Amino acid sequence: MSGFPRVLVVSPSSFNQFSGGGVLLTNLFRGWAKESVAIVHGDPLPTDDAVCGRFFHVGTDEVHWRRPLSWLQGHRTPEKTVLEQGSVRLDTGRSPGRALLKKALCEELPWDATVSPALSAFISDFHPELVYTLPGGAFMRLAMAIGLRWNVPVVPHMMDDWPSAPTGGLLGGVVGARLRRDLRRLFDASAARMAITDDMATEYARRYGKPFHAFSNPVDVAARAAHARYSWKRGAEFHVAYVGSILPQSQLASLAGAARAVSELAAGGERIRLDIFSAWGRDNAAALHPGPAVRIHDALNEANVFPALVAADLLLLPVNFDAASLRLIRLSMPAKVPLYLASGTPILAYGPKAAASIAYAAREQWAHVVDKPDLPALKKAILELANDEDFRAGFAARAKHAVAHHDDRVVRPAFQDVLRVAAGRRL
């Protein structure tokens, strides 16, 4: 298998069908020799072995808080998942005490990483030729330690701009500085560097003085086209949908605003509903105004996501407006975007144009964009889309054109070739 160097993925996310990170990994590595991929991860979501057959789930022997906080790990409720007929929800095991500790000391608690004997045996048995990592906290340090110990090149792939995000609490300044210092060391030592968007690649090249390749989630455009939407007649009840993560620092506030808009429109007599599909939905139910017009469901697996997108009359792409969220996610691209584009269902983007995903939607006009946190404007936009079929169809047509930028026949080979070159191999 000379064309497929053995890649060890080190990442908080694993290969899965439910989260953005998991779907991204699965789609980027699809077609790679399965026996040449292994992963070290910390993901509580169910793993998918379609492209990888070797999994090591880290525990406190590998990823742990620095002393003297390490004793608190023994009092932490672990994250759990609940599977039900192709859907999944996440029980985060959050406790008020841990939340208060993070707020008081540091939002990013000071994690350390150790190559335990069990992990060492797993890696030695695999004989990696390259480490590919989604860096952040302990997993960044773990990837660096593995690269040094096994003398293999490392390729980091940044998903968001966490180095620019504030790290609050008493220890925030110290922990944040250490994280940024470690990241710069990682970039300096890497065989290649990747970003999730062109905007991030450009800014990071300027910031860190190194070139970056840009790769976001690819989609099988040809396969999806056969099942996409080609009619934009709405149902008697206008059906709005959101699929994906719900995180306080990314999209929760704007999704909550959209949920409120739908609830108020329904209360005013409009026949409309919003379905939210997310593993994080139940954790955030209080903020999302659930009721007759807003329904929260567990996350769908990959086989069920696309039919749900096509069945909707309108898809939501929310991005938070607050400055703290924007510092983290302004250069990011949600993994759902290419699938949204491929579905043929019209899209409403609600977020600031300073965010790369919203700027992309406005520039290519593949979504109706509301770029101010304005509830009346949001309700007006929803009604315009609900009541004008030609208006909806125009956005859908432009989305189907834009999805060509995310075609897996172009994105995946380019991504995989960067890994081959970084490992010292070419086909």
Image (cartoon, rainbow, N blue to C red):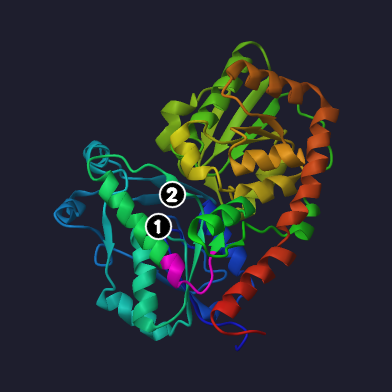
- Quadrant containing the C terminus is bottom right
Q: Secondary structure at mark 1?
A: loop
Q: Is residue 287 visible?
A: yes
Sequence-earlier tag: 2 or 1: 1
Within-10-Å neighbours for mark 2: few <14, some 14–19, many 20+ = some
Give the percent coordinates (x, y) of residue 211: 57, 65
Q: Amino acid at mark 1?
A: Gly
Give the percent coordinates (x, y) of residue 4: 59, 82
The residue drawn where x is 47% and y is 33% is: 323
- Of 172 and 373, nearer the camera is 172
Q: Tell how many labels.
A: 2
Q: Secondary structure at mark 2?
A: helix
- Of 77 and 186, nearer the camera is 186
Give the percent coordinates (x, y) of residue 195: 56, 58
The residue drawn where x is 69% and y is 18% is: 380
Looking at the rendering, the stretch of residues picked out in magenta corresponds to 186-193
- Of 282 and 33, nearer the camera is 33
Q: Is residue 416 left or right of residue 172?
A: right
Tell me, yes or no, whether the two marked residues, 2 and 1, touch with CB atoms within 8 Å: yes
Q: Is residue 78 visible?
A: no
Residue 51, compared with residue 73, is above or below; it is below
